[in-house]
Image (cartoon, coloured by chain):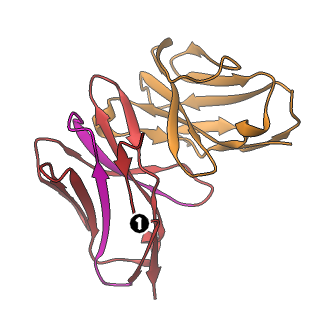
Chain colours: A red, B orange
Amino acid sequence: DQQVKQNSPSLSVQEGRISILNCDYTNSMFDYFLWYKKYPAEGPTFLISISSIKDKNEDGRFTVFLNKSAKHLSLHIVPSQPGDSAVYFCAANRRRDDKIIFGKGTRLHILP
Amino acid sequence: DTAVSQTPKYLVTQMGNDKSIKCEQNLGHDTMYWYKQDSKKFLKIMFSYNNKELIINETVPNRFSPKSPDKAHLNLHINSLELGDSAVYFCASSRTVAYGYTFGSGTRLTVV
């Protein structure tokens, strides 16, 4: 039962352009949504989060958009840089559960 | 100065053996977790502890037993290892879920 879905296993984007990573979820009770970045042989690193009561959160080059009616969120990276090449995990949480549910990840390749 | 450290990083062992993975965090967080990333790359929660108390146990076989001697440590002991236990195990800690987890770099367990 996948509550958090990332349907694109990989994405290639030219350096300097915008990278858009998508995520869908099924549980309307989630309180927070998070994005993690993971390099090979390292643990996931927290990137940015958004509360379910907001529709946008921005941190430098990273912006997360939340569309609750569509149960969809996306991560925008502008401009994309070579160091952004990594696997990105979408994740969600219900505050009362105190656990984070992860999607399967999308591998982002930034092309020179 | 590593925030969440796991040892060992790699572990190769035979079926039927018993092994332990250690985790320590120096962030002062109250909650610690074990996650498993299987061959399909899903990150799934196994256990969470809050201040040495078990909070979440996600239908993990009894062969897996977490132990938290203090709130800075959460070790994972696995009895009678099976081939299907081969995975990457991540330890994590958090202050509150909204701020995300801080993950360790993972332990790649291979059962042969």
Q: Nearer the viewer, residue A81 or A18?
A: A18
Neighbourhood count class around disc 1 (C-alpha, 10 Å): few under 14, some 14–19, many 20 upward:
some
Q: Which residue is mark 1?
A: A8
Quarter of the image for the N terminus of chain B: give it: top right
Q: Name the foreground residue: A70 vs A11.
A: A70
Residue at 42% x, 21% y: name it.
Answer: B30
Relative image position of residue B86 (x, y in whole percent): 73, 42
- Chain on which label 1 sits: A
For residue B14, side relative to residue A79 (left or right):
right
To which quarter of the image does residue A65 belong? bottom left
* A29 drawn magenta: yes
Quadrant of the rendering where the C terminus of chain B is positioned: top right
In the rendered image, the vertical position of residue B52 relative to residue A112, given as above or below: above
Going 31% across and 47% down the picture, which residue do you hit? A34
Q: Residue at x 32, y 84 (%)?
A: A16
Residue at the limit of the structure toward the bottom, as seen here: A112
Question: Tag 1's secondary structure?
Answer: loop
Q: Position of residue B63 (x, y in %)?
A: 71, 20
- In this rendering, position of residue B102 left or right of residue A25: right
Amino acid of disc 1: Ser
Which one is nearer the viewer's eye here, A107 or B99? A107
**As drawn, which residue projects farthest toward the front?**
A1
Point 64% across, 23% down: residue: B75
Look at the image and give the residue range highlighted in magenta.
A14-39
Residue A27 falls left or right of residue B21: left
Residue B65 quadrant: top right
